[in-house]
Amino acid sequence: MIAKLEEGRTVTSVAAEFGINKSVVSRARKAFQTTGTAVRKVGGGRPKTTTAGDVRYMILQAKRGRRQSASVIAQQLSTATGR
C-alpha cells in the first residue's frame, strides 16, 4: 500500500484496489511518515487469562464425553492449576 502511494497513486485509487476505506490508507501513510514503518504492534486488547495448557485441558475434558457445564470444567481447571 505504501509503495503504491510512493509511486504517486492517489489514496482513493489505492483504497479502491485493496477494497478498504480511504481513511485506512491515510492513517497507514501518516503512520509510515512518522515512524518509518508500516508494521502494526501486536498485542492490543485485554490480556488472556488462560494459557495454552489451560485450553488444552478444557478441550481434553470436553472430548472425554462427559456432559459437564462450563462452570464445572472451569472449577476443575481452577483446582488443577491453582488459579
Image (cartoon, grey):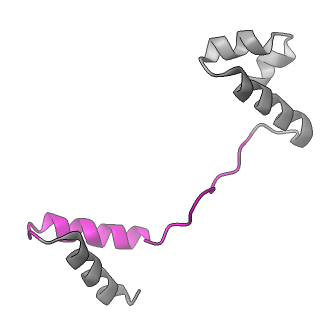
Q: Residue at x 34, y 67 (%)?
A: 55
Q: Quick one: 37 or 19, which is closer to the camera? A: 19
Q: Residue at x 44, y 71 (%)?
A: 51
Q: Quick one: 28 or 51, which is closer to the camera? A: 28
Q: Residue furthest right?
A: 34
Question: Would residue 53 be found to the left or right of residue 26 on screen?
Answer: left
Which quadrant is the C terminus positioned in? bottom left
What range of the chain is rendered magenta?
39-67
Residue 45 in which image quadrant = bottom right
Relative vertical location of residue 7 with respect to residue 52 in this rendering, above or below: above
As for residue 65 lying within the magenta part, the answer is yes
Relative vertical location of residue 46 with respect to residue 51 in this rendering, above or below: above
Residue 7 position in % (x across, y down): 84, 12
Q: Residue at x 59, y 17 (%)?
A: 19
Question: Would residue 64 be found to the left or right of residue 80 on screen?
Answer: left
Q: Residue at x 74, y 12 (%)?
A: 12
As for residue 14 lying within the magenta part, the answer is no
Relative vertical location of residue 61 with respect to residue 11 in this rendering, above or below: below
Residue 32 position in % (x across, y down): 84, 35
Which quadrant is the N terminus positioned in? top right
Residue 47 position in % (x across, y down): 56, 66
Question: Would residue 3 be found to the left or right of residue 36 on screen?
Answer: left
